[in-house]
Image (cartoon, helix red, strand yellow):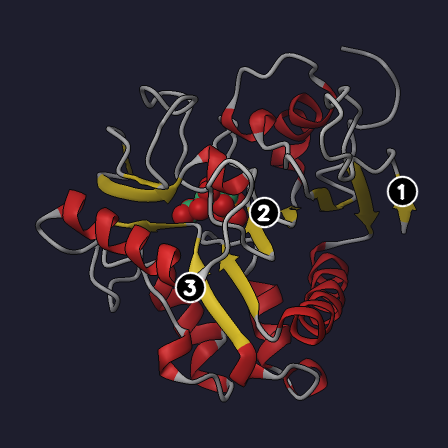
């Protein structure tokens, strides 16, 4: 394990000088999943002992599936007090829960169906509803009811897990979408479709209100975009704009995705 950058940690109030976010590089995707599972358990314990609950927004896509499988396994499942964990989603596709594209469906299959988390602690985005906007407003109400807010009034997750798309998107905040930088709501329905499916997403301000944000990035196809996101000082892409205001940002990546992080070559 190497630490390829300095920690971008909370310095509340002071203007955040740009510094490269912290990146932990592991041998392969399995080691990434294990490192993430260990941090998940550590953060669970920290926040449950400190605040009585652990509010986590999970990521969709393929990368986190190994992590969810580990957390559901004998080694990690018993280390977590699931009765105090509240699970949310960073984004969802506009499909029913049983659809193969559903992020909720994937997490239910890989994790929730195998741990003793109370149903009332599982808060999925109802992105399949015909009234998409109302479904987004209803999700905001859940956040308003369950989460504390930061000084700017945005809901604070203890942990938000994120993935990184090849175009620099994260959650369902796509560079091709309009208004993603200044979106005012907490939950948005961007005017983009990905693989022909509408999306619902937490907006950038909610991502940046989190106590901890962890990106999981693996695979050599992500090496170029990861370098841009970690090293590029301009913030042109959604993933480049994830800079927690009072929180900590961490990239947990495998050697293949991290292959271009060393050196200063553009
Ligand atoms: C989604 C995710 C999305 C994902 C990236 C990376 O709903 O698909 O929220 O942001 O994290 O596209 O996806 P992979 O992990 O499959 O590469």
Q: Which mark is residue 210?
A: 2
Marks 2 and 3 close (CB-CB < 8 Å): no
Residue 192 lies, with reference to residue 195, above or below; the image says above
Q: Quadrant of residue 198?
A: top left
Query: Where's residue 116, x and y in %?
Result: 49, 89
Left or right: 259 in relation to 78: right
Identify the residue shown where x is 73% and y is 23%: 16
Judging depth in this view, the residue of 160 and 174 nearest the camera is 160
Identify the residue shown where x is 55% and y is 79%: 84
Q: Nearer the viewer, mark 3 or mark 1?
A: 3
Q: Which mark is residue 84?
A: none
Q: Earlier in the sequence, mark 2 or mark 1?
A: 1
Calculate the distance from the C-alpha at mark 3 to the C-alpha at mark 1: 35 Å
Calculate the distance from the C-alpha at mark 2 to the C-alpha at mark 1: 22 Å
Return the residue at label 1. 3
Q: Secondary structure at mark 3?
A: helix
Left or right: 166 in relation to 2: left
Return the residue at label 3. 146
Q: Is mark 2 within 8 Å of ligand 1?
A: no
Q: Nearer the viewer, mark 2 or mark 3?
A: 3
Calculate the distance from the C-alpha at mark 2 to the C-alpha at mark 3: 14 Å
Q: Earlier in the sequence, mark 3 or mark 1?
A: 1
Left or right: 236 in relation to 21: left
Q: Secondary structure at mark 1?
A: strand
Judging depth in this view, the residue of 248 and 59 nearest the camera is 248
Marks 3 and 1 close (CB-CB < 8 Å): no
Quarter of the rendering occupied by the C terminus: top right
Q: Earlier in the sequence, mark 2 or mark 3?
A: 3
């Amino acid at each position: 394990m190497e630490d390829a950058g300095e920690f971008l940690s909370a310095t509340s109030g002071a203007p955040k000088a740009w510094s490269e976010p912290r990146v932990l590089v592991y041998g392969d995707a399995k080691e990434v999943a294990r490192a993430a599972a260990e941090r998940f358990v550590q953060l669970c314990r920290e926040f449950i002992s400190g605040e009585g609950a652990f509010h986590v927004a999970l990521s969709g896509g393929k990368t986190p599936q190994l992590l969810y499988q580990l957390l559901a396994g004998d080694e990690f499942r018993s280390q977590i007090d699931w009765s105090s964990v509240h699970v949310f989603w960073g984004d969802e596709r506009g499909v029913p829960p049983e659809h193969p594209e559903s992020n909720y469906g994937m997490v239910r299959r890989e994790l929730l169906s195998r741990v003793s988390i109370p149903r009332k602690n599982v808060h999925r985005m109802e992105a399949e509803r015909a009234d998409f906007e109302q479904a987004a407003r209803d999700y905001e109400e859940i956040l308003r009811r369950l989460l504390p807010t930061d000084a700017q009034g945005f809901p604070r997750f203890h942990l938000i897990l994120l993935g990184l798309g090849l175009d620099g998107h994260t959650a369902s905040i796509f560079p091709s979408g309009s208004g993603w930088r200044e979106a005012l709501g907490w939950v948005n329905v961007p005017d983009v479709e990905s693989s022909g499916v509408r999306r619902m997403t937490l907006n950038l301000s909610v991502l940046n209100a989190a106590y901890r944000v962890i990106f999981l990035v693996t695979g050599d196809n992500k090496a170029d975009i990861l370098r841009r996101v970690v090293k590029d000082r301009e913030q042109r892409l959604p993933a480049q704009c994830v800079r927690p205001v009072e929180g900590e940002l961490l990239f947990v990546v495998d050697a293949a995705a991290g292959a271009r992080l060393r050196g200063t070559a553009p």
